[in-house]
Image (cartoon, rainbow, N blue to C red):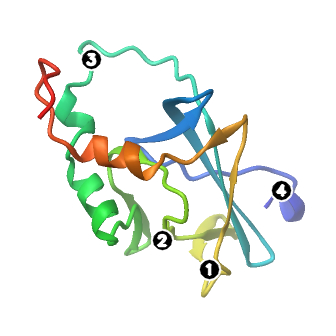
Amino acid sequence: TRIKEGKSVSLPLKGMLFLINHDGKVTTANLHTFVYQNRTMIVFGPANPHNVMKEARKCPDCHNTPILRDISGGHFIPVAWERGNLKNVSGVIPVLENLPWNFVFLNYEGGKWVPIEKPEPPLTNYSGYSSPITRAQLERLLRPQTDAGSRR
C-alpha cells in the first residue's frame, strides 16, 4: 500500500502483550508485520508503553495461562480470519525462537483487507538489540504463581 497508494495502513491487534529479552531482561515488545510481493516479515522490538492501569497485573495474568500452554503444546494460533474480520487472542505472549506464528497476512486492496493465499513463511527479525525468550524463561512462566508472588 505504501508503494501503490503512497500511504501506510495498519490493522491493529488489541490486547496482545509480547515479551522478549532486551539488555538481559524480559521486557515488553512491539510487533510489526510486513508483506511485499507475497514475502512476509515479522519484527519484534522493545516497547516502553505509556499506559497506566488502575490495577497492576496479577501473577496469573502472565503465569500458567492458556496462551502459554498452547505455545508449550505446539498449537498456538494468535490470529484468525473469520468472516472478513481478524480475531486475535488477548494476553501475555512470550516470543520464542522458531515459534510458528501462524499469522494471517493480509493485503489492503480497494479499501478492504484481503487474506494472502499461501504467503511465504515469514522472516522473523529482532530490533533494538533484542532476542527471543529462552526455553528456561518459558518454563518459569509456565509455573503457577500466586498474587503474593510465592513460587511453587
The Cα–Cα distance between marks 3 and 2, rounded to whole angstroms, is: 30 Å
Amino acid type assigned to the residue bearing label 1 in the image = Ile
Mark 4, residue position: 2
Q: Quadrant of the N terminus?
A: bottom right
In this picture, is 55 found above or below 151?
Answer: above
In the displayed structure image, the side of residue 25 where residue 69 appears, left or right: left
Residue at coordinates 54% horizontally, 58% vertically from top-left?
97
Secondary structure category for the residue under label 4: helix
Residue at coordinates 31% horizontally, 62% vertically from top-left?
72
Closer to the camera in the image, 38 or 141: 141
In this picture, is 68 found above or below 151?
Answer: below
If you read the primary sequence from the N terminus, does the residue marked by circle 1 or circle 2 appear first?
Answer: 2
Residue at coordinates 44% horizontally, 72% vertically from top-left?
84
If you read the primary sequence from the N terminus, does the residue marked by circle 3 or circle 1 appear first?
Answer: 3
Mark 3–mark 4 contact, CB under 8 Å?
A: no
Q: Nearer the viewer, mark 4 or mark 2?
A: 2
Secondary structure category for the residue under label 1: loop
In the displayed structure image, the side of residue 33 where residue 51 appears, left or right: left
Q: Nearer the viewer, mark 1 or mark 4?
A: 1
Amino acid type assigned to the residue bearing label 4 in the image = Arg
- For the residue carrying disc 3, how many other residues have a C-alpha within 10 Å: few (<14), some (14-19), or many (20+)? few
Mark 2, residue position: 102
Closer to the camera in the image, 105 or 21: 21
Q: Nearer the viewer, mark 1 or mark 2?
A: 2
Mark 1, residue position: 116
Mark 3, residue position: 56
